[in-house]
Image (spheres, coloured by chain):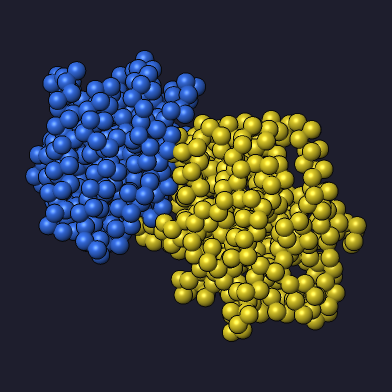
Chain colours: A blue, B yellow
Amino acid sequence: MSTVTVVNRLEIRFADLKKAGRGALVTYTMAGDPDHETALAIMKGLPAAGADVIELGMPFSDPMADGPAIQLAAQRSLAAGGSLSRTLDTLRAFRETDHSTPVVLMGYYNPIYARGVDRFAAEAAAAGADGLIIVDLPPEEAPELTEHLNAHGIHLIFLTAPTTDARRLPAVLAQAGGFLYYVSITGITGTASADEAAVKDAVAALRKSTDLPIAVGFGIKTPAQAAAFARIGDAAVVGSAVVQTLADSLDEVRAATEKTVPAVLGFVATLAEGVRAARR
Amino acid sequence: MSHQLANSFRTGADERGHFGIHGGRFVAETLMPLILDVEKAYAEAQADPAFQAELDGYLKTYVGRPSPLYFAKRMTEELGGAKIYFKREDLNHTGAHKINNCMGQILLARRMGKKRIIAETGAGQHGVATATVCALFGLQCVIYMGATDIERQQPNVFRMKLLGAEVRPVTSGAATLKDAMNDALRDWVANVHDTYYLIGTVAGPHPYPTMVRDFQCVIGDETKVQMQEAEGRLPDSLIAAVGGGSNAMGLFHPFLDDASVRIIGVEAAGHGIDTGKHAASLTGGKPGVLHGNRTYLLQDEDGQIAEAHSISAGLDYPGIGPEHSWLHDMKRAEYVGITDDEALDAFHRFTRWEGIIPALESSHAIAQAIKMAPTLPQDHLMVVNLSGRGDKDVNTVARAMGVVL
């Protein structure tokens, strides 16, 4: 097998932002929510709105680490024909015009396992994915996937939580690539708000063990919070609040309206403004 | 790869919780340290004779164990073949095998100093058993139950409330058992410090499949002794219904290395496997990852989990315990399907034959016995697990008969 030199956009983006002296805004939206075209239009608009890294949710019927906002987003996507194949279609279409924004696919393991991990890794790389977050694949179970991702230059991004103790951290870091995702609350997405002081201590502790950029997420809802956490870590991830903004723009049958794309991108722009003002 | 010895089917799971490719620990990172804590606490409890002595005491005086092994004379004569015995788990306190596991896990939760217990329930049997042991020890109890199931299992919902539990309706997804399990996992992630998740079947992340199996093995262990007393030898076949598979695993496991014993698990075939409306994960599913473990799952091509269907709410789950998946792969156990109609027919016939109203779950096992027994010689010893009593199902059966109560 010939060695393909893949330039991973995550590394480039985090290096550039480090030079610029600010943290990254990472946004999460669900592929196919509320329909394929609208979700693609949103994704295409995200870089201009100020998203530095895009997490693209892969819909799953049983998203047990997610709160109501993202659960409903997955249901809308699946109801509109969303699937792993369609998610990869979305990414391919995005890459027709954007070659520099890193994209991280985020979801659950079963659709990937059902597709075949080798096939998925090849297809995701060809579509232009830079990283992958699989919520229900802890490091103990990950080797069966990482071997294929490594072959295609895709980083498997791991989560660490407030419950991840010092004994466990080395196991997480051993396979971690791209960035480290610090789950700032003990809970599901989009519920509690993270405590700034506690996150500061946790991130400081993590930095002693890893040189990977650290993204903070799960409890960030406002531009001010995004700014604060992007200053503490290397990136702030906003998911449920973006998805909720989308949900609030839908009509009574949960279909997109003319407000949907501008509402989401407008909210992302306010988040970006916050993050960009928070220079370190 | 698994470290199971080729000469024994009873050594699993391996140290990371795998049964062949099945099992494991597929959970969010936030939960991993907690699950490792449960594993450690369970290993310590297993090594502590005081723990087993305490459990044995409650099983004897509170649950009412040992449960009898009953020879069903009329049924045997009617069918004219195998000699049919029933393991009477329906006579346990709360009316099913579920309490065996709840008693074990509640003692473990107490050892771990947990003050708040959460559980998922489908038909409500596990919810009632969990609420029962929480009342017994004065612990806070929250039960997640699909809104659809709450609607069709009102008496059990009321029982749980009488016992002091809070029943939280789950409206996400299809609002049934799998969704209740999702919400219980979400609760656990958010309440890691004081909460113990009391899983009701031999599924979920390691160590639950192994631990629940161990607590249910009292069924098979007793059966072995009782059959020895009754007939002076091992049974020739074992039959049990399989949803998640805890009553079946409890009966089967002590016999796995007895090669002469034929082992048959009965999945719910609903309206029929070919209709797609069933709950037969092994017959109609393929391996996948859900609720913390890899196992056979009902799912579509894209890996989205499908809705299960069974007249029996306790079997209405799109997955199955990972050890069953492994026994299926290894061909040590056979898994067959029984439809709603066959189970209902068995329910009625057994009630009239033996004066015992069986749970609809157990009726699936009885239906399989009705199919098999006439084809077997009269010296064939068959044990069917009567996993629960059918009082909870009289409304469902009345509806199926077109009777308005």
Q: Residue furthest bottom?
A: B402
Q: Nearer the viewer, residue A55 or B156?
A: B156
Taking A168 as reference, is A37 above or below it? Answer: below
Q: Looking at the picture, how far across and down is residue A216, in whole percent?
A: 31, 30
Q: Residue at x 43, y 34 (%)?
A: A186
Instruction: Determine the residue positioned at 43% across, 62% down.
Output: B174
- Number of numbered discs present? 0
| Whole-percent x, y for residue B87 in the image | 78, 61
For residue B213, side relative to residue A122 (left or right): right
Residue B29 in sight here:
no
Rendered-image quadrant of the C terminus of chain B:
bottom right
Residue B380 or residue A162, whichever sits in front: A162
- In this rendering, position of residue A253 left or right of residue B333: left
Which residue is more in the foreground, A181 or A96? A181
Residue at the far top: name it: A208
Q: Is residue B402 above or below residue B32?
A: below
B322 with respect to A29 (left or right): right
Q: How far across and how far down the image is residue B270, in percent? A: 54, 72
Determine the residue positioned at 46% across, 44% down.
B186
Question: Which residue is drawn at the image coordinates 42% and 38% (left, top)?
Answer: A187
Residue B248 visible in this rendered orientation of the protein: yes
Percent across and percent down for residue B289 are 46, 49
